[in-house]
Image: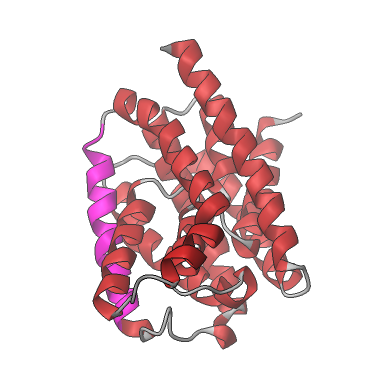
Amino acid sequence: MNPSLIFVLTGVLAGAMNALAGGGSFVTLPVLIAGGLPSVFANATSSVALYPGGAASAWVFRDGLGSICGVPLVPTLVVTLLGGLAGSLLLLFTPNATFDRLLPWLLLLATMTLMFAPRVGAFLRTRLTVGKPTILIVQFVLGLYGGYFGGAAGLMMIASWSLLKGADIKALSAPRTLMVTAANTVAIICFSIAGKVRWEACLLVGAGAIVGGYAGAHIGRRLDPELVRYGTLLLSTAITVYFFIRDTKYA
């Protein structure tokens, strides 16, 4: 298959995944790396490419925006932007070899959080009182994660919010897409200025992601949240295993 077409189709799938539950970078990262990009460049290129699709999804979901875990939208947005800036700057100072070794563990963290957050969250909520400062600190860390890695940032947000307060994926779709887009906004500015984006691949993936993101947002309004969660979990687990095998092979 034509490499350009592969990049476009990858973007469509990733954009749809981001709109449904997050995790689009689970698809774009391995494809971009297989296309010859070093891991840091692949991660930066993926973040920039998926940005328009995420913004399109945020626009579709705009009517559902509201507070997050009881905290108003504006302060949550501010700490997300600050976290995204810190994370993107941290990535720029991370050597490719170091990021290669971190990548499987970052994917595993996202997958395990998605897998166990509902059970752990139910346990913690009966024993802890979560206030506004805690939620804002957690959101800063999520923004940092999104700016640094980008991969599965939406999944991490959903899992963390579910852990703190409890809610289904569909109810969190609107604030998730906005917060991921916010973290990525500052990240893509930093990555672009630093020259870490491969623009030819970025534009192809990004074009597909716009289509996938817009379509996925509309489809997501009709799908069972649990079906979306388990489908995303299955794919994220498979790709995490792949990256551990890849890391062992090239160690």
Who's the residue at 50% across and 12% down the image? 249
The magenta stretch spans residue 32: no
Is residue 180 positioned above or below 72 on the image? above
The answer to whether residue 240 is above or below residue 177 is above
For the C terminus, the image quarter is top left
Q: Residue furthest front?
A: 127
Q: Is residue 139 left or right of residue 180?
A: left
Image coordinates of residue 205 in percent, x first then y, are: 59, 47
- Residue 76 painted magenta: yes
Q: Position of residue 190 (x, y in %)?
A: 28, 52
**Region of the chain picked out in magenta, as a range:** 75-94
Q: Position of residue 151 (x, y in %)?
A: 47, 47
Residue 35 shows in this picture? no
Give me the residue at 33% from left, 55% from top: 187
Q: In this rendering, would 9 be left or right of 169?
A: right
> Residue 192 at what x, y percent from top left?
33, 49
* Above or below 163: residue 233: above
Q: Is residue 98 left or right of residue 54?
A: left
- Quarter holding residue 188: bottom left
Query: Which residue is at 49% across, 51% downward?
Result: 113
Image quarter hosting the N terminus: top right
Q: Quadrant of residue 22?
A: bottom right
